Every structure is written in C-alpha cells, then in structure tokens.
Amino acid sequence: MAKAPVLTPRDIDFPRWYQDLINKAELADNGPVRGTMVIRPYGYGLWERMQQEMDARIKEAGAQNAYFPLLIPQSYFTREAEHVEGFAPELAVVTHGGGKELEEPAVVRPTSEMIVNDYFSKWVQSYRDLPLLINQWANVVRWELRPRLFLRTTEFLWQEGHTAHATQDEARDFAAHIHRKVYEDFMVDVLAMDTVAGRKTVKERFAGAINTLTLEGMMGDGKALQMATSHELGQNFAKAFNTRYLSKEGKQELVWQTSWGSTTRMIGALVMTHGDDNGLRVPPRLAPVQAVVLAIKGDDAVLAKVREIGDRLAAAGVRVRVDDRTDTPFGRRAVDWELKGVPVRIEVGPRDLENNSAMLVRRIPGGKEPVALDALPGMLPAILEEDQALLLTQSRERRESRTVDVTTIEEAVEATAAGGWARIPWASLGEEGEVKLAEHAVTVRCLVAGDGSVPDTDDAPGNVAIVARAY
Amino acid sequence: MAKAPVLTPRDIDFPRWYQDLINKAELADNGPVRGTMVIRPYGYGLWERMQQEMDARIKEAGAQNAYFPLLIPQSYFTREAEHVEGFAPELAVVTHGGGKELEEPAVVRPTSEMIVNDYFSKWVQSYRDLPLLINQWANVVRWELRPRLFLRTTEFLWQEGHTAHATQDEARDFAAHIHRKVYEDFMVDVLAMDTVAGRKTVKERFAGAINTLTLEGMMGDGKALQMATSHELGQNFAKAFNTRYLSKEGKQELVWQTSWGSTTRMIGALVMTHGDDNGLRVPPRLAPVQAVVLAIKGDDAVLAKVREIGDRLAAAGVRVRVDDRTDTPFGRRAVDWELKGVPVRIEVGPRDLENNSAMLVRRIPGGKEPVALDALPGMLPAILEEDQALLLTQSRERRESRTVDVTTIEEAVEATAAGGWARIPWASLGEEGEVKLAEHAVTVRCLVAGDGSVPDTDDAPGNVAIVARAY
C-alpha cells in the first residue's frame, strides 16, 4: 500500500501543494490582518541568508545602508503624477496617532521614492556628493486583495536601493550593474535559479520610471515570477523634488536616478522552483542548515556520536544542526527535515556505531548510502556543490524545455495555457498585441534582444517578447 | 585667537551639543512626520554593528529570529488590561486600506506581545515545543509628543525577544540571562559603557510584566538612560491568549513567559556617553570604521600610498576606510572624521612618503605622533584595544565620581539637580518617596542589592534605589 502523501501532489493542485508546503515546512502563517504574514523561524532563516548574500553584493556595488521613516505625509504622494496613480489604490493610511486625529494623514510606505528624494534634495549640493548610493532593508505595505503567502502579501520585507548620479549614462550603467551583477548573480549563484534578464514594456514599467529591468523565473507549473527589478528613473523624481547639484562647471543640474528592489517573494520563488512532492529543496549555498545529523535512538553513545559529528562538520565549514530530540519519533523528524529541504541528512543509530558509519541521505538528487564517518567531513563540501549545480541545471532545463518560439498571439496563448512560456517577436506583437494577450491573463514578462542580451530600447530590431501567465 | 567650536560645548548647552553632534556627524535627520527620523548611512552603520554583535549573542542564548506583522487588529489590545492601559495613549492607527475604510482598524505595532502570543498559543502544544525562544528585528511606532533623535522617536528600530517556558524558574533564569549575558555583556564589552544592572520598581515596570530587569547608563550630563530591559511576564499573556502545553505528566499547563528589547536609542546613549566637544568617539570594537587613511594631497604617489596602507590594514583585520577625496580640503575632512569619532586617523602627505612614515592621530585619548608605515599594521590592534579600555574606564569613573549615597529625599533631589545619581536605601524611600521624587522629575532608575547584585524582590533587606533624572 502506498504511503499517503504528506503534501498535495503538484500535478493534482499546484497552488494547494504550495500552501501545504509553506504550512508543513513551517515557513509562514497567515497574519490576523488580511494579507499579512508571520514568517516563522525556518522561513526567516532563509530570508536572513538571502539578506547576507545580497547585502554583501549591494555593498560591493558601492551602496551604503540607511533607514527612512515608515510614515510618509499623504501630500508627498501627489508630487510625481505617474507614481501616485500607480500606488494610490494600495495605500494604508494612518489617520490617528497618540489618541488624536492627525492634521495630515500619514501613509505607511508602499515604497520610499517619495521620502528618499525629499532628503536627497537636501543632501546633494555639489558634484562631490555624487553618486549618492543608498540601500535600505525595510518592511512595506501595499494593500492586497488576493493575498498568497510570500508571493502577494499586504506587508512584505525587502531591500530598496535609491541612487542619484551626475549623468544619465552613469545612472543607466548603475541600474544595469544592479540588475546583472547583484540580482542575477545572486539568483543564479546562490538561489540556483535560472532567470531571464530583460526589460519591461512601457505597460509593465514601475510607476515613475523611464526603464525597468527585470529578472523572470519559471516556476514548477510553468508560470513566470518577477524576481527583482531595477529602474532608471530619469529625472522624474529629481524634477518633483528639485534635486540639483552644482556641476564642476558651476551650473545647477538635475540629478539622474535609479531605484531597485527585491523582496521576501524570493522565498516563494525558491519553493516553486526547487520544491517537489516531498517538500522544499534548499540550494546548499543558501541553506541555513546544509546538513542535519539525526540521532535515531536516544542512547548515550548515539547522542555522543551525533554531537561529535556535528562538531566535526562545523569545523569543516558546513552549516550543520544536530537533531537529538529523541522524544519525537525518528520517522517524523526525518519527514520534517525532508519537508524543510535540508540538503543532507546524516542518520546515526546504534548499529552504525559498530561500523563507525552513518546513513547519508541526499535530498536533492535523492537516494541514500552508508558512509564511513571519518570520510564524511571531507566528502560533504563536494556533495553540496554537486547538488547546488544540479538544482540550477534542473531549473534551466525546465525553462528551456517549456519555452516555445511562436509567431502569432493565438499560438502564444495556447503555449502559456499548456503551462509554459512563449517567445514571440516584439515587432509582430507590439502594444496592441500586449493588450490582447492580457485578455487571456497572459503578460509580456520582458523583452530580450535576439542574441539574448538586454535591449537598450523597446523597439530595437530583433527584440523578442517573453510572454507567460505570471504570479 | 581661538578656533570657533564646531559644536556647542557640552558645558554651555548639553541638549544643543547633542543635536549639533547628531547633525554634523551625519547620524540622523528629523523625518517629515513629527517624531520620526531618517537614520543616515554613518548612523545606520553604527546600528548595523550593534545588530551584528547583539544578534550573535541572542542566537548564542538559543533564540531564533522570526518576523511578525506590523499591523495588529485593534481588538487584540483589549486582551491584557495593564498592557492596553500602558500603550493606548501612544498608538498609531490605520483606518483606511486599499482605498476603503477598514472594518476593524489596525494598530501599527508599538511592541509585539499581542500578536506574538496569538501565534504562540497555536504553536505550543506539548512540553516538547518548549522553551520557545523567538527574537525579531523590526520597527515599532509609539506616538511621541516630545521627540528627540534616537532617544525618543515616534518610530524606532529594535529587537524584541519573546519566549515561553514550562516553569516560572526557567522563565526567570532566561530573563536574567538576557539581562546580563546578552545586554550587559554587549554594553560593557562592545559599547564600552559602564551600566548598572537592577530591577525596576512596580511603578516603572513594563505594562503587563511581573518583573522588569534594566540596565541604566550615566550620560555625560549625569542623567540616566535606560539602555535595555528584560521582562518576566509571568502568566499574564498566557492567560489572555490561553497559551497552554501538555506536560510530561499529561496535564494542560499555562506557559511562563519573558520579553526583552533594546533599540536605536543605544545610538543616542553612545553619543551622550563617549562624545566630547569635538564630536563622537566610537569604541573600536563597535566602530564600523576603526581607522581612516587620509591623503593630504592628491598627487599620484600619495594616492597610491594611502590605498596600499588601506589594503595592508584591512589584511591585518582592521576595519579601514581610505579617504582620497582630495577635491575636498584636507582640514575639512579631518574635522569630519573627528566629528564622526573614528578611533584612528592615519594622515599621509608628500613629505611623509620620503620618510616612509605617516601621522597617527588618536581620537580617543587625543594626540598625534609620526609612525613608521611598516610598523602600523602591527601596532593598530593593540592601540584599538587600549582605546576601548580607556572609554570604559572613563565611563565607569564618571558614574562612580558622580554618584552619592544619601539618606533623605531632599538630599537625593539635591544630588540629581547637581547632575548626578543618588543611592538611597529603598526601605527609607519606598513607593511614597518615589511619588515625591517624581514631583522633582526624579525617578527610581532601579533597585540593586546591598552587594551590588540584582535583587529577587523589591523589598529584599538592604535594597538600594538608584535615583536620577533620566532621558
């Protein structure tokens, strides 16, 4: 008789599988205010590792962290017309503070362009103050009518970068650097996620930007997910806030700006990219716990041995946890670590002690084999790198095998309905075709150049639109 | 002719000196919504270092990080009577979301006991789930009528720990562990701040706690500042949220809880403890920049040399920055680093190159001397540790020299008005005396036992009250 599945299988109901996994792997719970979430310790551990890796790359790019207020006067939101139109329907508004109605309501930040630019206009005086490269890690609130944990939540955590430059070229280069050298590098190298780097169409651009660069990932069901975006803001906000600098030539000039963000949505992407019917599979370079050493039984010799193995693996640079909670049945703990997607389990019972061996269980390729304990610390780093590479390969193969080249809107709709992406020449789609696709809940995820690079304009010859259903 | 001071001298106007320093060292700005603040990159760099050091200690204590929602249904605040009474006057309330009035208003969290306990009651089922040790790094909002940057702000950043235990003893021990081994260890060892560890009187306790442990620091003007608190919550919140566990004996029992927090206020404390009339002095173990290497002039040989020194110091494990912004006058940059309190400046000009030497300027003890460049990487670690120790000694000497033993309320008021602390037997002060002190804006900062330890009860024989004016 087959074992009852722990999760709803993906083939039967992908959204339900996702909810089951988030719940049973203890990643997050729904919050009491609609659309909010509680990120549980294991889910937050994934986010902490994402923060560490991203923060290092952001600092390497020259940006410094700072912190701007959560509450923004409502009047600020009228300053940049497109921006306010984009965000108005999603705002949460504080009308009372300290027991009184406020003279001016305050908006809980949905993003910080408005308040950051208020300060940039004070801090930037001369060309010596440029480039000004700022990042913040913060929570934001955008009222969400159809919430889904990690993917669409009323409150989410993110980093948002905001920069000011002397020239348009510098701003453009910096937005591109963040796009490829920070975001894409992180996603490919750490998250083991194959992504497509491209530019958004005018319709899909960030409200207030002159260009939005994006990374799009294909999820396990063939839908697309926008992983992170980097925007050229041109001088739109500089004009709204009169952010000027004295040039070397002694002239007052408006700055050129960028902004860029990535969010806790990446945790949802991780689940939907690498998860299988047994749970999550965490790429080893990201994993807060790369290996767990389990005591099968609670006798003293076994407990001493698992602790010793834990110490030896930690000394070898492996992020390891010892599971000696032998008052919980071993089978339940094994299933739990499988759900949580820890790359390697090392299981130790009384009989293993005699042989000085342990059972090595690999979550990512699957399979188990007995290994000599003395060999373990030397073996693990290579195993973890092998598993990291396998996840990236699987992600790439999925995208390649489920993307088709098409020439008509009908073919594009058909391909995406079957659970995949379509590539269609932008010249034959165009903005009118984009509107037609929307009627089928299909969107242009991004434009890429014929050679796969990121095009400089929407209408460059040979541009191809990647179209898909999306989260 | 004396140089005009960069800051208002402390002796002339301490609060104005504080504001000047925060502003000129570029630590923070006032936000547009009253009482909020923008933490600028240099100020945020201090906070990031505080977070790193604290987070390591919190994890060492066994707690895991998680994240709870910013928005809490207003009705939750009625569940614990004392707690709601304590926080009601400070709440910020969201009444509109997504363009509509909300059915139930949501409170922007002033602290998270209410929402954390809602989930603890779901997550805790059996004794196997205990202790449950959670921490979160987050922003909170408490409407502030008399704001002062870092010290009292409507929004601030903090960590808040929340734990649940099987027994009262375990909860008490954990609250004490956080108090001494996390908070006090961090403050003494990293912030180089002498603090007094004690318990709060009933009047000064956290709303909803059965015991509040505190660390109190003496600022440069002799006033006290509460640095961090750790609370035993007893079963107050467990009762309000019906948080029970199945004991080993098969009985349903209420959990025992703690909560504990420390905030961006510590940045204000750092300024007021170690700052002098020339600016901040940052303890080397905390300092995001321990040494700055300045190019006095912009010729190629000097620029190459400062970069080389920077690389060598970084290789020696020093957190170093190279200042090669020679389009800004050297004098202005030197004053700026002095204001920012970077412990060591290494100044290199064309003449230094000939001698293969540099000028070493020490911010903490003061003074400058030429040093051989080759000796520098070897010298610096010992110099930084010496400066770290000096700051702690100065902080301790200030507290000791400005604390007096008194026996009457009149003497206590006199001592605190003169800019210091008074120690008075709790038996001769009592709750009535505490009320009288309040008429003079003097508060009992904490109770300590006769031998300097933290007493187990307010009324233990020999308890001494530390009384002071406070921030």
Image (cartoon, coloured by chain):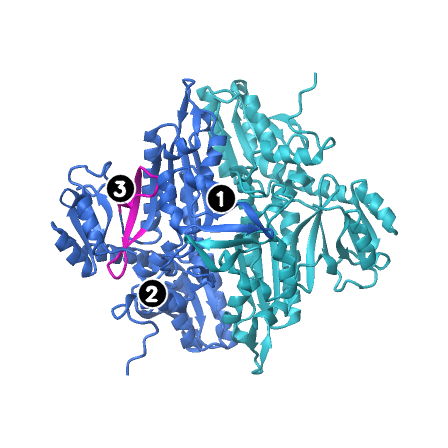
Chain colours: A blue, B cyan
Which quadrant holds the C terminus of chain A?
bottom left
Which quadrant holds the N terminus of chain A?
bottom left
Packing grade of label 2 (10 A; few <14, some 14-19, many >=20) is many
Label 1: element kind: strand
Observer-nearest residue: B162 or B203? B203
Assess whether residue B426 is covered by the magenta stretch: no
Task: Reply above or below: B12 against B195.
Answer: above
Residue A112 in the image: state x and y as whole percent: 44, 43
Q: Earlier in the sequence, mark 1 or mark 2?
A: 2
Label 3 belongs to which residue? A202
Same subunit under labels 3 and 1? yes
Residue A124 in the image: state x and y as whole percent: 47, 29
Assess whether residue A206 is covered by the magenta stretch: yes
Same subunit under labels 3 and 2? yes
Label 1 belongs to which residue? A72
Observer-nearest residue: A166 or A181? A166
Query: Where residue A18 is drawn, which disc sits there?
Result: 2
Kind of residue indicated by mark 2: Tyr
Q: Nearer the viewer, mark 3 or mark 2?
A: 3
Label 2: element kind: helix
Residue at 44% x, 40% y is A114
Packing grade of label 3 (10 A; few <14, some 14-19, many >=20) is some
Tell me where residue B464 sits by quadrant: bottom right
Kind of residue indicated by mark 3: Val
- Magenta residues? A197-226
How far is mark 3 from mark 2, CA to CA?
32 Å
Residue at 20% x, 46% y is A465
